[in-house]
Image (cartoon, coloured by chain):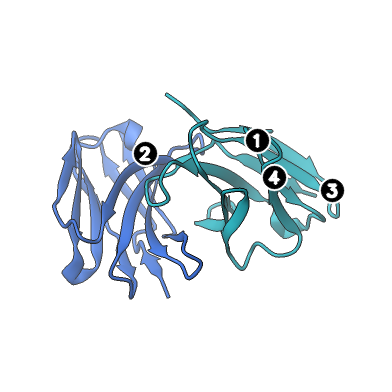
Amino acid sequence: AQKVTQAQTEISVVEKEDVTLDCVYETRDTTYYLFWYKQPPSGELVFLIRRNSFDEQNEISGRYSWNFQKSTSSFNFTITASQVVDSAVYFCALLHHASGGSYIPTFGRGTSLIVHP
Amino acid sequence: EPEVTQTPSHQVTQMGQEVILRCVPISNHLYFYWYRQILGQKVEFLVSFYNNEISEKSEIFDDQFSVERPDGSNFTLKIRSTKLEDSAMYFCASSDDRVYGYTFGSGTRLTVV
């Protein structure tokens, strides 16, 4: 079975602090995809990044960076110099190949990030 | 930037009533999805749709649910006889690649009273 664990329910930081959101996943598939989504207070889900299981290169996009480590089944997300606008719920998701040929996502429970001015 | 449009943004219905949630996916996308998020909880997959048929569905997607793509643009989720526990935010998403990140709509908040 597939499982995504985001152990941090809520994180509170002060603006300009760096913060890392943890994501640990479980799957028996050799091919899978990992995602991060942001859900701001307005409620929509915003795609941030996708990683496939064969690409362990870390990625940086502005203040965002992602650390994918297959050895520990983790796909952690770091925000550098956090800003108030980063306040949101962040979801990690695992996309795996289902028996019917489709890909099915499993989401973690989300981490609520609160950035105080 | 292209977006997925969902209507209505909020719907209140009485228990036992049928509701239809509507979505207009991005025009060149081929894969369509419905998800549900009960307040404060994680996002749950309901169903995926490709080539005019359901390609995958979760345990949540039981006989009271159905999906349809009645024309070239709309993608609907019907809940036949709503229950209190169907109260949730329902997200539609579409993708042009089944393994790419989906584009989500803004959601329809369904409240069953």
Tell me the kind of residue under disc 1: Asn
Q: Nearer the viewer, residue B11 or A81?
A: B11
Q: Residue at x 16, y 57 (%)?
A: A56
According to the image, label 1 marks what residue?
B74
Q: Residue at x 71, y 59 (%)?
A: B85
Q: Which mark, residue B110?
A: 4
Q: CA distance from mark 1 to mark 4?
A: 19 Å
Q: CA distance from mark 2 to mark 1?
A: 33 Å
In this rendering, which labeled residue sits more in front, label 2 or label 3? 3
Q: Nearer the viewer, residue A38 or A18?
A: A38
Instruction: Locate residue A88, reporting x and y percent.
Output: 40, 41
Closer to the N terminus: mark 1 or mark 4? 1
According to the image, label 3 marks what residue?
B14
Q: Residues at badges 3 and 4 in contact (C-beta under 8 Å)?
A: no
Q: CA distance from mark 2 to mark 4?
A: 25 Å
* Quarter of the rendering occupied by the N terminus of chain A: bottom left
Closer to the N terminus: mark 1 or mark 3? 3
Do discs 2 and 3 share a chain? no
According to the image, label 2 marks what residue?
A87
Write down the colour of chain B. cyan
